[in-house]
Image (tube, grey):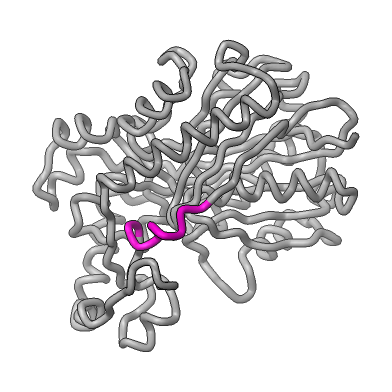
Amino acid sequence: MTHAAITGWGKCLPPSVLTNQDLATFLPTDDEWITTRTGMKERRISHVPGIELAITAARRAIACAGLTGADIDLVIYGSCSNDETVPNSASGVQQRIGATHAAAFDVNTACTSFMYGLSIGTSMIRSGVVKNALVIGVELISQYMDWDNRNVAVLFGDGAAAVVLQSCDEETGVLAEKLQCYADSRQILRVRGMGTMYANLGAEYGQTRWDFDGQEIFRKAVQGMSEASLDVMRRVGVTMDDIALVVPHQANLRIIEAVAKRAGATADKVFLTVQKYGNMSSATAPVALVEAVETGRVAPGSLVLMPAFGGGLTLSSHLLRWGPRVTPLEVSDAELTPCTTTALEIVNHIRAQKKSGEATAGCFASLSFAEGRGS
């Protein structure tokens, strides 16, 4: 049987750090309030478009695998904050990395976009359609954030990560996955303003209002990720004792702790980045995976469990067996353009732009959604 090994990995975090103290300069909050509720201390804010983050992460992953862009047969771009819709963002990465003959498409399942992309890339390799695939998770959430809404503004940041999948005979890569969606709860996490329906109401794209039911999201996320994790372990015939590391979606420390408890994982088995990067939506899980490898937390041949959830409400859990290599074959010199502004300056500029368009914001109040009836 053909398998899809992860042979390359790379991440790209913008250099500008937005701290809890920075957020307190324009929100009614402080470091203690944010830390006790989320576990977050910092998050990154990008000075470049999301596709630049993706390209940098992709080049690092490709070099890590010892390949060139021309070796890539497929580019999957996982994101819900694309710089462009037509043409797709994946084709922009394909062009810049020189993957001349590759197929390229975008995936949007919100925070699970990378994980769904990992399943798609793995399946296409197993079926023989492609041999080498590049899967990216990237978000530029800062541009679409409702910075006046404390409940969401403290949670999210920007970033990107990528992996290279290669056809192999060894049983490595994704061993089992569970993909699901609680569509009847899709209205509890909605970004009003991202989509053509809002333009018809006079709103500019990026002028957003967030619907975010934190308690219900917590309940669904914990239920979905823990049940999916237990399911994939059962199907492979392993228990948590066999799992070397759990690398969950880093939406909130309380959610992570609750999922780990239900799935039977002790704290020492759970890899955390939430304190440093917050929730980067589809970039969160792959950034954590790459960092786990880079810091020596993933050993050759070890089992890694990756549960995630996102808007939709989509959910997933993937059980991976890591391959024999945990160090890069080559190192890329890809870097972002230098940043001359602080994260707070970038955010305040975004806020000022949004304030100038507030006259259109009233359109959101006129739009009602019928819950559970195809909304």
Work out whether 47 lies above or below 273.
below
- Looking at the image, residue 146 sits to the left or right of residue 33; the answer is right
Work out whether 218 lies above or below 306.
below
Work out whether 34 lies above or below 271.
below
Give the quarter of the figure containing the C terminus: bottom left
Residue 37 figure quarter: top left
The residue drawn where x is 30% and y is 45% is: 155
Q: Position of residue 86 (x, y in %)?
A: 60, 76
Residue 144 figure quarter: bottom left
- Looking at the image, residue 238 sits to the left or right of residue 101; the answer is left
User: Could you say which is closer to the camera, residue 361 or residue 45?
Assistant: 361
The magenta segment is: 181-189
User: Could you say which is closer to the camera, residue 317 or residue 231?
Assistant: 231
The residue drawn where x is 34% and y is 80% is: 204
Q: Chief secondary structure of the magenta span?
A: helix
- Looking at the image, residue 199 sits to the left or right of residue 329; the answer is left
The residue drawn where x is 16% and y is 34% is: 31
Q: Position of residue 104 (x, y in %)?
A: 73, 62
The residue drawn where x is 77% and y is 27% is: 172
